Amino acid sequence: MLTRRTLLQGTAAASLVPAGRALAADMPGVTASEIRIGNTNPHSGPASAWGVIATAEAAYFQMINDQGGINGRKIAFQSLDDGYSPPRTVAQTRKLVEEDEVSFMFNGLGTACQTAVRQYLNAKKVPQLFVATGADKFGDPQHFPWTMGWNPSYRTEAAIYGKYLVQEKPNAKVGVLYQNDDFGKDYLLGLKDGMGEHYASMVVKEVSYESTDPTIDSQAISLQSAGVDAVVTAALPKIAAQMIRKIADLNWHPLHIMSNVSVSVAAVLIPAGPEKAIGMLTAAYQKDNSDPRWVNDPGMEEWRGFMKKYLPSADLADANFGYGFATAGTMAHVLRQCGDDLSRANVMKQAASISGLQAPTFLPGVLIATSPSNFHPIRAMQMQKWDGAAWQLFGPVITA
Amino acid sequence: MSALLHQTLSGLATGGIYASVALALVMVYRATRHLNFAQGEMATFSTYIALTLIQAGVPYWAAFALTVVLSFALGVALERLLLRRMAQAPGLSAVGVSIGLLLIFNALSGWLFGYTVKQFPSPFEGRSGGVLGGLVSGHELGMTAVTVVLLLLVYGFFRFTRLGLAMRAAAGNAESSRLVGIDVGWTLAIGWGMAASLGAVAGMMVAPLVFLDPNMMSGVLLYAFAGALLGGIDNPFGAAVGGFAVGVIENLGGAYIVGTELKLTLALVIIAAVLVLRPAGLFGRAVVVRV
């Protein structure tokens, strides 16, 4: 039985040597035989469904180690639980950096959690790589040169919707429902990026909701009575499901574009009623394991083989395993690129010079690419449409 | 014009949600003179019990009745085992316990039933598109009717039954009540049980509208408090009117006056203004204590 604990212990076994045995003064967390990587994740608490991301990453690094490691070094990956609570993220991150002396932090999860440690890690010049959030602010090399995002940012995603609307529905009267916080506001900014001068004429109504609001019925009615015929919804799953149902209840048939965080079949479409969402659009960047078109896809075969060997009891329908596989793959790519110079400065430099990496689980044409001025690794997505039973990809890959 | 009517009706439907939870708050307050901050989370937990029963194949109304009974037992048990020990403690201790229960029930719902948003069936769901020309859905209409029935039941209970009278007496003056033969301990427990049952009904009515997840009631509770305070926390009629009023004010204010960002603020400013003028709420009676 391979559990998260045994995995983490397994990968951490090599790190039993006392801390502080750095190869050189400028390469903390690195010895001749290993490199230590830290991570914080919600292994408990309200967001614990995402904890499996770290499980998948630990398994991926185990696979790398089984294959002999990278440049002769094993990866000692240590994931600590922060319960999705920023104060605990701070404590756990300090512990990893100061006591366990990790070389850098990788794929810490949560916008608020990672914001809480961003200043600290930048002040200590510890790379905060590939954070697991879509907040746009994690790709700001000018002010935070040691922090880099990974997910396509909400702003990038919204820019893609903006471009799509201008191109395909130039006469649309667009309405936006957004959560009144950084997450929702990133979508407004992104739509402005993507629509440019058309924003002012096309967007006729923006309505917000608070995360404490029990319903958005009133907002939906406002959008409908403003004559909106294309809705962009930037909401978390529960409100997204309400919006889908309310639009159907109102007997209203606008083009509906849904934020990519709320397109889960199990968590949004089934509760809302799959037939009520027919025709809804969103953008994707990863292959969906339940999509029959990837049955014989070599990339997905590679992922399924990995899952079978390292996480045999895991639920393949859980997209978080695919996500962790891809983030860990990106990290391994950067470490290979580093060669023997595993100083923090070089890790950061190599992370900022990824040129067109195609992850096995990504849609063809969606490439991971960074540069010293671009700390948003994924900037392209493809539109897809809900047909009542599955998401159907269509059109070209759109770059924001 | 039709948009205005639509916003008003939608506000009434949302207000029905607040009103039904506000009634449970009034129930506990009248029985114990305390606010139960865990009322919303207990209702969510009850709703999960109902969903589990329905998924196990129990017919809707049987599951509904069973959930009401189980919730009553849960409420009574909490009072007898936990709140009872706080009887001699300062008022703040009971507040602390109820906030503790809020956290416990929230975590318990998540731990036992998961955090994924779930659909909850409605007994009133007709065709999609709704009634009254699509202005309200069948469920919204049914839920509002249930709220009104609950209101009449609670009102009638306190006004016309001996137990209701005993409960008012026990909450008002425990010492004198004991002297006239009222079992104060049990009236408190029954008050908690009835509030838990009311909460369960509210949860089962709200869940089809807002979807069920462990945090379903956390936002609703804020609005229910506001509604109850606006109408008068010791008056079931006032609390229900307050709940409906908050729903309508919020919708109309958000759509026509201040915009969506400030709609809750507007509702709360109005409530604060009312409470400054009438501290006991619109329909509440000021409690006079002789010293």
Image (cartoon, rainbow, N blue to C red):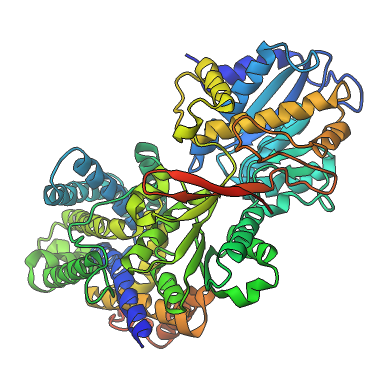
Q: Is residue A307 left or right of residue B150?
A: right
Q: Residue at x 69, y 54 (%)?
A: A400
Residue A251 percent across, percent down from the top left: 33, 68
The residue closer to the viewer here, B230 or B82, is B230
Look at the picture and state if A316 lies above or below A204.
Answer: above
Look at the picture and state if A83 lies above or below B287.
Answer: above
Q: How many marks?
A: 0
In this rendering, does residue B180 appear at all? Answer: yes
Q: Residue at x 55, y 73 (%)?
A: A171
Q: Residue furthest right?
A: A25
Look at the picture and state if B69 lies above or below A75.
Answer: below
Q: Is residue A162 left or right of residue B140?
A: right
Quarter of the figure with the C terminus of chain B: bottom left
Q: Is residue B69 left or right of residue B284?
A: left
Quarter of the figure with the N terminus of chain B: bottom left
Residue B231 percent across, percent down from the top left: 31, 78
The residue closer to the viewer here, A348 or B20, is A348
Quadrant housing residue A206? bottom right
Q: Residue at x 39, y 65 (%)?
A: A215
Look at the picture and state if B7 lies above or below B118.
Answer: below
The residue closer to the viewer here, A384 or B225, is A384
Residue B29 percent across, percent down from the top left: 28, 65
In this rendering, does residue A5 appear at all? Answer: no
Residue B288 percent across, percent down from the top left: 30, 80
